[in-house]
Image: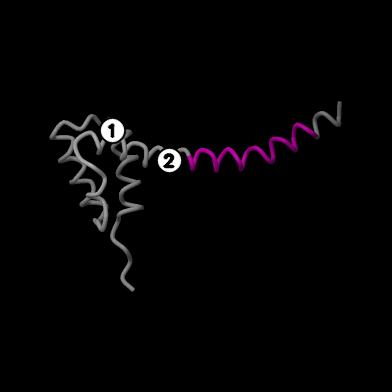
């Protein structure tokens, strides 16, 4: 019985950090997935090439797309905004 408890504890100790990584990866993939699905409903993703907008600029851009009919929930809005700001945001001055 003691061995089983130790084995379960060991599995949980390893699984917990892995679960955090999996959740983070799923969230990142979900942002890309939403951008690919929602944004390409009306245009292709070539529009993202070379873009470097601030978080507020991306927020405004997304709101504009929603006003044009992009089907985005509040949760999806946040995920898309985070993805675009991270991957297509203003680069730090060098």
Residue drawn 22% across and 51% down? 56
Q: State how the image is colored.
A: one colour
The quadrant of the rendering that contains the N terminus is: top right
Q: Is residue 21 inside the magenta stretch? A: yes
Q: Is residue 10 magenta?
A: yes
Q: Main secondary structure of the magenta part?
A: helix
Quick check: 26 left or right of 54? Answer: right
Residue 74's tag is 1
Where is residue 55 drawn, in percent x and y? 27, 52
Q: What is the x, y in percent for residue 76?
A: 32, 34
Q: Residue at x 50, y 38 (%)?
A: 23
Which image quadrant for residue 17? top right
Residue at horizontal 16 percent and vertical 31 percent from the top: 69
Q: Is residue 91 above or below residue 29?
A: below
- In the rendered image, the quadrant that contains the C terminus is bottom left
Q: Which residue is mark 2?
A: 29
**Above/below status of 50 relative to 68:** below
Residue closer to the observer: 90 or 9: 90
**Badge 2, how many Cα within 10 Å: few under 14, some, many 20+?**
some
Which secondary structure lies at badge 1? helix
Q: Earlier in the sequence, mark 2 or mark 1?
A: 2
The answer to the question of whether label 2 and label 1 lie on touching residues, with beta carbons closer than 8 A, is no
| Nearer to the camera, 6 or 57 | 57
Residue 9 is situated, as x and y percent measured from the top left of the image, at 74, 35
For residue 27, side relative to residue 53 (left or right): right
- Mark 1 is surrounded, within 10 Å at the Cα level, by few (under 14), some (14 to 19) or many (20 or more) other residues, namely few
Numbered range of the magenta stretch = 7-25
Q: Secondary structure at mark 2?
A: helix
- Residue in view at x 54 percent, y 39 percent: 22
Residue 44 falls in which quadrant of the image?
top left
Q: Position of residue 8 (x, y in %)?
A: 75, 31
Whole-number angstrom distance, CA of label 2 to CA of label 1: 18 Å
């Amino acid at each position: 019985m003691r061995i089983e408890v130790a084995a379960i504890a060991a599995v949980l100790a390893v699984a917990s950090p892995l679960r955090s990584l999996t959740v983070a990866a799923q969230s990142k993939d979900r942002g890309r997935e939403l951008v690919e699905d929602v944004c390409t409903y009306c245009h292709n993703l070539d529009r993202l090439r070379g873009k470097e907008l601030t978080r507020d600029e991306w927020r405004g851009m997304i709101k504009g797309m929603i006003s044009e009919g992009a089907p985005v929930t509040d949760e999806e809005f946040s995920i898309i905004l985070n993805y675009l700001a991270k991957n297509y945001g203003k680069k730090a001055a060098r």
